[in-house]
Amino acid sequence: MGGATGGGFRPVGGGFERNYPSPPVHPPQQVHSGQKRAFPFSGRGGNSPNRDRLGSSGGNFAKLFVGSVPRTATEDDIRPLFEEHGHVIEVALIKDKKTGQPQGCCFIKYATLEEADRAIRALHNQHTLPGGVGPIQVRYADGERERLGAVEYKLFVGSLNKQATERDVQEIFSQFGRVEDVYLMRDELKQSRGCGFVKYCDREMALAAIDALNGIYTMRGCDQPLTVRFADPKRPRSGVADSRGGAPAFGGPGFGPRIQAPIPRPAPNFGDTMGDKVPPNPWHPMSPQNTGPSNPSIRSMGSHLLPRSGDLAMPLNPGFNQHSSQVPTVGQQISPLQKPLQSPQGLPPPFQLHPLAPVSYSQTQAAHSGQLQVPLSNPLTPFSQALPPQHSVGLRGQLPASRPPVQQNTSSAAALQNPSGVNLPPNLLPNSVPTTANQQHLPAPMQPVQQSPSQLAQMLSQQTQTLQASFQSSQQAFSQLQQQLQQMQPSNQSMTLHQNSQASRQQTVGNPPTTTGTDVASSTSGPTAPVIAPTVAPVECHWTEHTSPDGFKYYHNIVTQESKWEKPEELTLFEQQKRQQQKPPMQLPQTQSYPPQASQAQQVQLQTQLQAQIRHPPPQLQQPFFPSSYPASGIRNQQNTQELGYGQQPVAPSPNDPARFQQGMQTVQDLAWKNKP
DNA sequence: CGACGGGACGC
DNA sequence: CGACGGGACGC
């Protein structure tokens, strides 16, 4: 498939290509009451800006922009297609202002966001109009997203295998929630540049993906793990009078219109699950802060979110950082279906319970929990897959499971086409998981859809073991380091930061995610958090100030992983508090108090090492894995040559290997580009 | 190590 | 009220 236009990628986790979701054609009225927008937390009531807005209140509409429309197309060619997903209020074909020539795009107006959503999901990149060269692009018109309060969280993904398709990428990312869109960057020849963008509609999904993949997951055929971070704001297409909301930078969209309730708490449970992690590849040191020891933000190291120079347009985005939603109860529990998988050895045959055989969203959920159906969306998935179950349970198990853990929303075309999960290519099994369960190879933390249960089982158990081992050794290391630290600085004060944050994260984690929303406001890092912990120890503030390579200040939240240009109130308040407390010895360790006291510096360094160790256990723990070639059926299948998937190392690239050539080309192109006048 | 898709409102 | 052009990212 790959060839053409970014290739028929299906944006959404559930592959419905030919079978449209539920009733393909809805009378517009029913649409309202029926389907809700795929938004994970709608159940909780009003907090999500995504929801509620258009719900039923009339007067609104949702306009879509449609690209790749053949210039020859007429409304009659287009309308029916969109009518399949809702009542089309209007079709506006765009013509050149001057010449009157069709521009190859149009606008479609629906009455509701639900219809629009459905159309996007069903059509984007999936339908080619007669006479068209590639599939149409269907997305919200400029400004619509903002207007409708539909947020999206876009991740930049680097170090992709250049052979990977949109779909491959989607599979990797689907584990954390429904992937709204994947865009791979390609050169003129349509070759992947090895990076791209992945969108979620939910922040927690994005965070989960970052947590689980960034610096950790290495695609097959790659020697580097993925880079996964929030995308920089899109480079503004110059000129185009910018009326609309720019891309949400950093932590994601500002938040639609105003967020009603204070979404107290920032990123819930992440952070600790794996222990703090240090992205292996902390941002290329370019400025003093990053080279020096002065950047203690352990987990972040600025890695995901540092603004890039050249993207100064960002401040256009007002307040991102609001947490539109909260607490998605990530991987709280292992689903019963998953449990069997933990069994290390007894690898069940690939039949029987195949947890990943969703047929539709709702069925998926029902199948798992036997419970009522929830909206289309899959909340999160999780870590149960990406992490050793034990960890998940240990750290998050206490969370009230507010909704059925739906794992494997990796449900994709593959799963659909192959609901039984039985007909997996035999080569998959031996391939990714060697026989012994005890190996040090970490199996892929996230095997995409095609995994058979047995594979999952093995993966999980292996991961578990490995991680446990590394966890233990890390703990030892930690103790040692701790001792060293204490010797170095008897003041003991130095540990407070770290411990504090640990404590607070625990608190965070322990917090019932789904409770009624207000009680969660305990953290100081939430935008509107109460901030006051009466007298005692200074409340912790997760925000710290940093300076971008461009010399601009920005602020980073260790816990939520957000960054923003504006100074967060919490930090301001926090600093005030500090001052009032008149604790001379204590200074904000994380701010730019260069040069940091030696002790701090050392501590940071040690911690960093430790973190790195935890997160990046010795080489053998790295598992190069990749969502292998697709199982039977589908377009892809016709290309038997790809049976082994791309990028397999063994296959030595021939001298005239296109990929190689391509690389050379790229370099040249890059240079040319960079040096262009 | 890679950063945003062709086109963008004709009302 | 006020409104051009043409080209546009500065890494």
Image: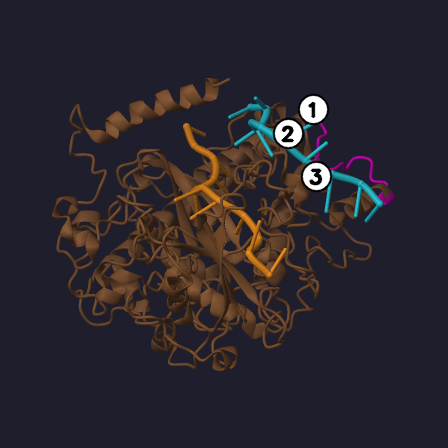
Chain colours: A brown, B orange, C cyan
Query: What amino acid is at disc 2?
Result: Ser
The residue wearing badge 2 is: A294
Mark 2, other Cα within 10 Å: few <14 / some 14–19 / many ≥20: many
The residue wearing badge 1 is: A595
Q: Position of residue A10 (x, y in %)?
A: 35, 57
Distance in Å between CA atoms under marks 3 and 1: 18 Å
Mark 1 residue element? loop
The residue wearing badge 3 is: A493
Mark 2 residue element? loop
Distance in Å between CA atoms under marks 2 and 3: 17 Å
Distance in Å between CA atoms under marks 2 and 1: 7 Å
Kindly report which numbered mark, 2 or 3, lies closer to the viewer in this rendering. Answer: 2
Residue for point 17% across, 59% down: A633
Does the CB distance between marks 2 and 1 fall below 8 Å? yes
Q: Position of residue A140 (x, y in %)?
A: 51, 57
The chain letter under disc 1 is A
Q: Is residue A217 above or below residue A280?
A: below
Residues at marks 3 and 1 on the same chain: yes
Residue A378 falls in which quadrant of the image? bottom left
Instruction: Read off the magenta span.
Output: A580-597
Sooner in the amino-acid sequence: mark 3 or mark 1? 3
Q: Position of residue A401 (x, y in %)?
A: 49, 72
Mark 1, other Cα within 10 Å: few <14 / some 14–19 / many ≥20: few
Q: Taking the image as drawn, is residue A386 in sight?
A: yes
Q: Position of residue A676 (x, y in %)?
A: 47, 19
Q: Is residue A596 magenta?
A: yes
